[in-house]
Amino acid sequence: MKDLKLGAKNQKEPQQTIITVDSHKIGLDFIIIAGPCSVENEKQTILTAQKVKEAGASMLRGGAFKPRTSPYAFQGLGLEGLKILEKAKKETGLSIVSEVIDPRDVSWVSEYVDILQIGARNMQNFSLLREVGRSRRPVLLKRGMYSTLTEWLNCAEYILAEGNPNVILCERGIRTFETYTRNTLDLSMVPAVKEITHLPIIVDPSHGTGKLTLVEPMALAAVAAGADGLIVEVHYNPSEALSDKDQTLDPPAFAALAQKVRQLKTFMDSLRHTGEQQRKDENPQV
Ligand code: PEP
Ligand code: MN
């Protein structure tokens, strides 16, 4: 991909971007981001945050600005939502990931969140990309639902080119002719991104499938594919969720997923070490 001046991996000396957020090193440690689709109120957010923390999540997600298909659907609490997220961080220590949808909001939203999320619908909003590129905050760049890998990586390049090296990619599924699932989760992007760039990539099996029963299997598949982390929708009582309730896990289901993910990650790491050891044994002088 010849246009990637900053995002491309140096094939001779492969490097990996590592992004530090609080005590987490994204790109090195596997991260699990979990929380509600939307911040609805203080009780919902704090209770959910406590539950995902107990289950081992490292960061809390929650939208304060919701880009909804219908202008009449719940649009998020805005500033009030960000203040709730700030409180949730104080109470649980979880780092905060939240979406920004308007370039005019980037600088003040950055005061409340640890990672700025760019949603699928805004992946090619170039003025928004440039603005988050000028921010000091790491950016989670979701893949647009109609975007190719080249288009997606060029959007990352917009952010990098403005001087922000801290970009995390997120595969969240694309539109295909399949209608059983909400989107088609394209897990081949995980090894493809790793082949081409040095940026970390995480996977969103919630929006990627839209179906409760498919979230855990696809989370595990993402781990096997080599993802650097997951972002999962969880609500303390999904039946009450104001958005995306059909794909939102309850705390026990999330705890089960997180435990299996950790076990599988340990196993995948052991396979990698076995491979490295075998190469060393076959090639002792290297
Ligand atoms: C979200 O994370 O809540 C969201 C709106 O995701 P996406 O932009 O991937 O649809
Ligand atoms: Mn959602």
Image (cartoon, grey):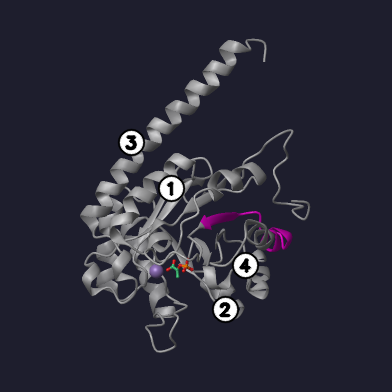
Residue 235 % position (x, y): 27, 65
Q: Quadrant of residue 283?
A: top right
Task: Measure how far apart labels 3 and 4 are at the Cα level.
Answer: 35 Å
For the point 37% across and 61% down, which residue is it? Answer: 89
**Foreground residue, 23 or 121?**
121
Q: Earlier in the sequence, mark 4 or mark 1?
A: 1
Is residue 119 visible in the rendered image? The answer is no
Q: Which residue is mark 2?
A: 102
Magenta highlight on residue 17: no
Image quarter in which the C terminus is found: top right
Task: Measure how far apart labels 2 and 1 are at the Cα level.
Answer: 27 Å
For the point 49% across and 45% down, which residue is it? Answer: 228
State if disc 1 and disc 2 touch (CB < 8 Å): no
- Which amino acid type corresponds to the residue marked 1 in the rendered image? Ile
Establish whether ligand 1 lies closer than 8 Å to the Cβ of label 4.
Answer: no
Looking at the rendering, the stretch of residues picked out in magenta corresponds to 157-170
Q: Which residue is mark 3?
A: 263
- SS at badge 1: strand
- Which amino acid type corresponds to the residue marked 4 in the rendered image? Val
Residue 197 % position (x, y): 65, 47
Q: Which residue is mark 1?
A: 31
Q: Earlier in the sequence, mark 1 or mark 3?
A: 1
Image position of 228 (left or right of 77): right
- Which amino acid type corresponds to the residue marked 3 in the rendered image? Gln
Establish whether ligand 1 lies closer than 8 Å to the Cβ of label 1.
Answer: no
Q: Earlier in the sequence, mark 2 or mark 4?
A: 2
Q: Image quadrant of ligand 1?
A: bottom left
Q: Which residue is mark 4?
A: 132
Name the front one of labels 1 and 3: 3
Image position of 204 (left or right of 103): left
Name the front one of labels 2 and 3: 3
Residue 155 % position (x, y): 66, 63
